[in-house]
Structure formats: C-alpha cells, structure tokens
Amino acid sequence: MDFKQEYIEEVKQILKSLEHSIMLLDNQPNNPEQIDNVYRYLHTVKGSAGMFDFKEMERLTHELENIYSDIREDLRAIDENILDLTLHAVDVLNDLIEENDDGGASQQIIDSIISLRGSSGEIITSADTTSSTKQKEAYAIIFTPTDSIFKRGINLNAILEDLNELSWHEIIIHNESIPFVDQIKARKISSWLEILAVSQEGVESIKDIFMFLNDSDYQLFPISNKEDFHSEAYTELIKLTDEEANWRIEKFKTFDQKLFLKEATSEEKPAINKEEVLKDLKSVVVDLVPEEIETSSIENKTTGSKSKKNSHVNVSTEKLDGLINIVSELVTFRSEMQHLLSEVEDEKITEAVEKLENLTLKLRDSAFNIRLVPINIMNVKLQRLIRSVSKDLNKEIDFITEGLDTELDRSIITALEAPLMHIIRNSLDHGIESPEERIKRNKPAKGLLKLYSYNSGDHVFIQIQDDGNGIDFKKIKEKAIAKNLLSATKEYTEKELIAVMMSAGFSTADSVTTVSGRGVGMDVVKKEINALRGEIDISTEEGLGTIVTLRLPLTLTILDTLVVKVSNEKYLIPINEVEYCYEEEHSKLFKTNRHLINYENSFIPFVSLREFFSVEEYPEKETVIIINKNDTRIAIIVDDILGQYQTVYKPLNELIQDIDCFSGASILGDGSTALILNALKLKP
C-alpha cells in the first residue's frame, strides 16, 4: 500500500473541511467550535507532514496553528485579514500536497503571519494573567502502541514530540528490554508507556495529540488524587502499590505544588470512555480518521451496540469510471442477448434472459447510485467566489441556498462548476446593484443571491436567482447593433435578445476587469451545459431580478429510450419525454399545410421525420408521438415504434455535434447505430 498517497488523499479531505470551517467563521467570527475545528485541522495536517517529507507544509501549518492558538486563548480576535490569509494558505497547501509549489508562496504567508503575530497592539499584553487563571488538570495516559501503528502511517516520534506542547509531562517506559528509541527505529515495539501529564487547556489538548489512534492503543484517565491510580479501570491495565501511586502524585507536585489541593474523595472517577472520545472527535473531524482505523475501531467495540455512524470509503473517480464502463458494456451485451434469443422458444432460456435483465438493472442502479453526490460539495467554492467577487465590487451579498442535498452524477458536478461560477459572477457584476443604487431604489443595501435545486423525474433543476436590476435589454441591443448582430430598424423580443446575449464573444461589460469583460460570455456557459445534455433558460424582470434555470440529467451514461423507425433508419427518443402515442392516417395529418394536430383541445405543432430527413414516400398509417419537454409540447410523426431500449449514451463526433436536433448516439442490440433525437430542436 502507498502510505504517502493515502496521506495525500486524507489531507485533501481535511483541507476541504478546513475551508468549510473558515467560511462558517466568515459569517460567525466568534464561533468557538469552528475556531477549534480550524485549529485541529491544522494540527492534524502538521502532525504527519514531516514524516512524508512535506517540510514546507509542516512549516506553514505550524505558523497558522500559532495564530489560531492565540485566538483560542483569547490573545487575538479573528478578523477578515486572518480569514483572507487562511483561505490563501488553504490554496497554497493544496498546491504543496500536489507538489506544484516550490515553497515561495508558503514563505510569503509565513512572513505575513510572523509580521502579524509580532505587530504591536495585536496580541493582548495581559497574556500571562489570562493564562494563569486557567485551571491546571492532571491526567495519566496508558499508551500501548503495536507494530501496526507504523503500517497505518502514524508517526510515533511526532506523537511523543507533541507531548511537549502540554504544560508538563513525564514518560514511564514499561517492559523496556530493548531501548525504546531502538524499538522505534526497528519498527518493532515491545514496550508500553505510562504518561503523566498536566494540561492547562483541558482534555481537548490531549485528545488532539492522540486523535489518529485506535481504541486499543491508549486509555486516558483524569487524576485528582492517589485513589485514581487504584481505580478498577486503571488496575485492569497496571496494578500499583501505594508507594508507586504516591510516587506518581509527588511527580505531579514537583511541577506544581498547588495540584490536588482540593479535598480528596474516595469516589472512584471512571476512565474517559475512548469510544465516546473518538465518536465526539469524528463528529467534528469527519474526514480525519482513515478508513482502516475507523473500521478497526468498530470491530474492537465490546458493547455489542451498532454504530449509528455510517462508514465511508474513499474511492478514486478512475475506479468508478471503470465500474460504470463495465456496467455500460453489460447493458449493451444484455440487449444483444435479447436480440439474438428473441426468436428462441425455450422456457429455460427465456427465464435466464429475464434473470440477466433483472440483475443488470439492479447492478446499473447500484453503480450509478455510487456516483451520485450532493450538490452541496460545491457550496464552499461558491461561497469563496461570492466572498471574493463581492469584495472586489464593493457589494454586500446575502447568499441563500436550498435543496443542496439534491444529488447528481459526480462527473456532471465537476463539469458544472465552471458554468455555475460564471453565472454567479454575472449576477454579482451585471445584476445586483451597488449598495448606494439599491438604497435609491428602496431596496435593502445587501443584495440577495439564491441557489435552489430540486429533482423532477430523471432530471435535476438548478436555479440561480438574484434580486438585482434584471437584464438590460436596451444595452444588449445597442451592443449587438454595434457588433452588426442585429438591425437598428427592427424590433426584437426578449427571447431573441437573450439568444443574442448567448452568442459567441458577446459581453455588455464596458471594460475588462478581474470579474468580467474578456469576451468569454454566456455562449460558453450554454455550450458547456449542452455538452452535459442539459438546457439553460433565463427569465428576467426589470428592476426585480433574474432567474437562470439549468436542467440537467441525473447521469450521462444510461438512458431509457423509445426506438422508432423512419424508412430503413432507427432513432431513439428519451422515454421520459414521451407523453402519449397513437396511430393516424397520413392523409388526415397532412390534409392542411399548417402542420398542427388537435391534442387535448389544443393545437400543437408536429414534425414528420420523413419530411425532415427528406424521405419522399409515406406509409398510409403513421405513428404520432406527443413529446412533453420543459412544459413544451411537440408531436413527432414516425413510421412505427419498435419498442423500448435501455441505451448506453455516446457523445457525438465533433463533425456532427453542432447538429442540434441530435443529442447523442447509441449502439443497438443488433450492432447498428441509432441517433438520439432532441425533439425541441426539430423545426416544423
């Protein structure tokens, strides 16, 4: 096993959690829980960075840890400058873990931190007084490391070094037949440690040191008097005489005579339950515990109760893609089998084919469920973008989200990030007004940006809403006329002007800024959404705002379709778009030139695929398929319906991908290729 790669993947997860906590602190600067979380994440990354030779990362996290240590101890107030510095550091740490940085950027941050910590007036001068009022607490830790600790990528020396961060500690080595230092070098541990420790930061400071260890690796006991060394839980691990217990108490008192001045009580204090400690820790640092440790912790529980926490396994996207490819091939093979055996009249073979079909469907559903992830994983990136852009534009923004638990295929979410960020930039730059302008218009100074997502059938809808000024159609028309895209003498509908806005290179920005004006506009967004088999719709109202709606498929690979025949060709129609089918005589359909049919007391347009593809001869009877897509109805006329087919979607070749009446292609069970129709793009 590649322990370095495992560590890298683990650190990436920690950095995501770190970034999330920083964004929470941006809204709640005095949230002690999130301050503690940031400190622990930094401490965790630092703890093993040196072991895997990430020296710059170790230095940077150490300096950041110092800043947040000051904040935890009320020596410094958290401010926007510290948050900016930490967010920048997260980006640099991501580069360092990928080895894309030579250390120059990290050194700049370290210099800034040193300057910040050394600046006058920043750190409270009464630190000694504040610190001295904190209660010193005594603990005993029974640490029983085994050889497996090295296999789990844990740096034993780093744990022992971290003990120096406590107020005081003393290590008693038991069963030291070989010097303990030599045992560490040889990675063969036969000794176990009894650690006496004093902390002025409470039990959390000790938990931080041992956060990577298994339940079986250590036990933690609070010590208030000699009787705690004779407790039942302590005696199970080591049985001490009165003399040995007194010696330990005296060791504590050599550090501070004021320890244990409270009246001793014979009431036994139970040992801290490691299981609860780890449970609490994992609830805060969900991604910090490697899967190996988490699994073994569950196995070592003796209570017999089931864990309420679901275990998770990190799997690379390459492996998931491989699984999906195999499932896709299996779906195609199943269709081939059905085609080959369709005329075989054998009950056993028919049952076997049905069983294969059922198992394939179950495997397909399971495989695609594995790839589904909540849209929420983009939330931190979007928050950072809004924070950065709003500062550049001197605008105040309230960002509200709803439905972020809606799930999409991981590959779709990855591809969706760029267009979604572009839409948000547009809302902030072109849509939401400046605070002064909003006040003039009797609006709150703070602009509102909302991201809302929901499921509908086999699709996911994502809406980005703002309460800005709406789209300036007058400005769009002026720019379009200047670019010779529109005529100055003609009137255009809002829909036509929105289409112009999405043309290549079109931008209404008057100058190039860090936010916009570089000619990379909504045409790129539209192209990227279309590449995902999605659609984009824009509605706007002057003075009230704009809503951008994205319609996306749940997955890009498997599609349930209706196979239709036109002359000698076969085409596929996504079955979720089909509302109704019926047969009709050709003469009745074409008795007028209006290309309309009466359906449910309303006239809807129809497209004859024979006419569309210039096939001259027509059958006497044809099949009408009513398509309902995005609340828009259109009828398609075909020769016949051959049946349903679960297709493996294939993107179109670059030579024909601009023909928008086709959204993709697939291989049928008989080995032939069929194109997937995009019904709304068929022009009557």
Image (cartoon, grey):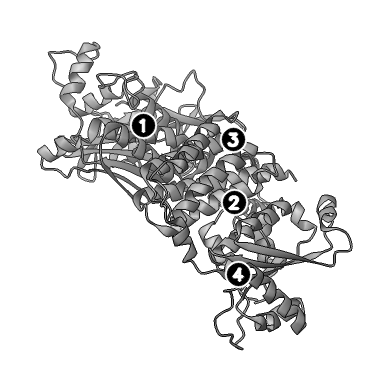
Q: Residues within 10 Å of mark 1 (few under 14, many from 20)?
A: some
The spot of residue 417 in percent (x, y) is 43, 36
**In this rendering, the label closer to the viewer, 1 or 3:** 3
Residue under numbered circle 4? 256
- The disc, 2 or 3, on the residue closer to the chain's N-terminal end is 2
- The disc, 3 or 4, on the residue closer to the chain's N-terminal end is 3
Give the CA separation, mark 1 to mark 3: 27 Å
In which quadrant of the rendered view does residue 100 lie? top right
Q: Residues within 10 Å of mark 2 (few under 14, many from 20)?
A: many
**In this rendering, the label closer to the viewer, 2 or 1:** 2
Give the CA separation, mark 2 to mark 3: 16 Å
Q: Secondary structure at mark 1?
A: helix
Q: Residues within 10 Å of mark 4 (few under 14, many from 20)?
A: few
Q: 600 or 651: nearer the eye?
A: 651
User: In the drawing, what numbered circle is on residue 44?
Assistant: 2
- The disc, 1 or 3, on the residue closer to the chain's N-terminal end is 3
Q: Quadrant of the C terminus?
A: top left
Residue under numbered circle 1? 422
Residue 256 in view: yes
Q: 139 or 372: nearer the eye?
A: 139
**In this rendering, the label closer to the viewer, 2 or 4:** 4
User: In the drawing, what numbered circle is on residue 96?
Assistant: 3
- The disc, 2 or 1, on the residue closer to the chain's N-terminal end is 2
- Residue at the image point whose x is 70% and y is 44% from the top: 51
Q: 602 or 453: nearer the eye?
A: 453
- Residue at the image point whose x is 59% and y is 54% from the top: 288
- Dot 2 and dot 1 residues touching (CB under 8 Å): no
Q: Secondary structure at mark 3?
A: helix
